[in-house]
Image: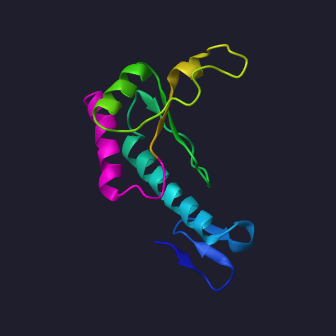
Amino acid sequence: PVRYADNGYLDGGEKRYPLDTLPNARAAHRAITESATARQYTAALGDLPWVAVPPDYTFPSNYVLRVKDGRDKLFADLRARGVECMVHWPASWDGVVTDLNREVLSLPLFPELSEEEIEHVIAAVRAARGA
């Protein structure tokens, strides 16, 4: 839950945001909601040995998994299960494909995700490798 505190902070549970550093309340709500979803993904997927979850960060705009083997297969499996995942960086800026370019995959992350949709994403990732 998002609370506006009387002391000039927006309280998002585990994180507090100074209101004067946020452009508006909508942006603040988005930041807190996305942070909560990112923490939920990390808690549910962090035990999988074949992915690296991102570190905790304050204002995530993408939830990027690093898939240690089979990113393209996971991408296809998630899409087949109705999960709108993305590959943002198919090649680096200089056109050279690196290991990282072949391993990263972004999961859905936006404030309008329902609890049911978040659970569906988590279940789809875990089911893709039988976890």
Q: Find out whether residue 125 is within the magenta segment.
A: yes
| Rendered location of residue 44, percent (x, y) | 37, 46
Q: Residue at the top extreme?
A: 96
Picture coordinates of residue 4, whole percent (x, y): 58, 79
Which residue is drawn at the image coordinates 29% and 46% (left, top)? Answer: 120
**How many labels, in total?**
0
Residue 80 is drawn in which quadrant?
Answer: top left
In the figure, 34 relative to 24: above or below?
above
What's the residue at 55%, 66% (across, down)? 29
Stretch of the chain drawn in magenta: 109-131
As for residue 103 lying within the magenta part, the answer is no
Above or below, 30 relative to 18: above
Q: Nearer the viewer, residue 3 or 86?
A: 86
Which color scheme does this rendered protein use? rainbow
Residue positioned most to the bottom: 6
Say if residue 11 shows up in the picture.
yes
Q: Is residue 119 above or below residue 98?
A: below
Left or right relative to 37: residue 19: right
Quarter occupied by residue 37:
bottom left
Residue visible at 51% across and 23% down in the picture: 103
Q: Position of residue 25 (x, y in %)?
A: 61, 71
Q: Quadrant of residue 101 in the image?
A: top right
Q: Quadrant of the C terminus?
A: top left
Magenta residues, dominant SS class: helix
- What residue is drawn where x is 58% and y is 49%? 60
**Could you tell whether 78 is left or right of 39 in the image?**
left
Q: Nearer the viewer, residue 66 or 96?
A: 96
User: Residue 22: x percent and y percent?
Assistant: 69, 66
Query: In the rendered image, is residue 131 in sight?
Result: no
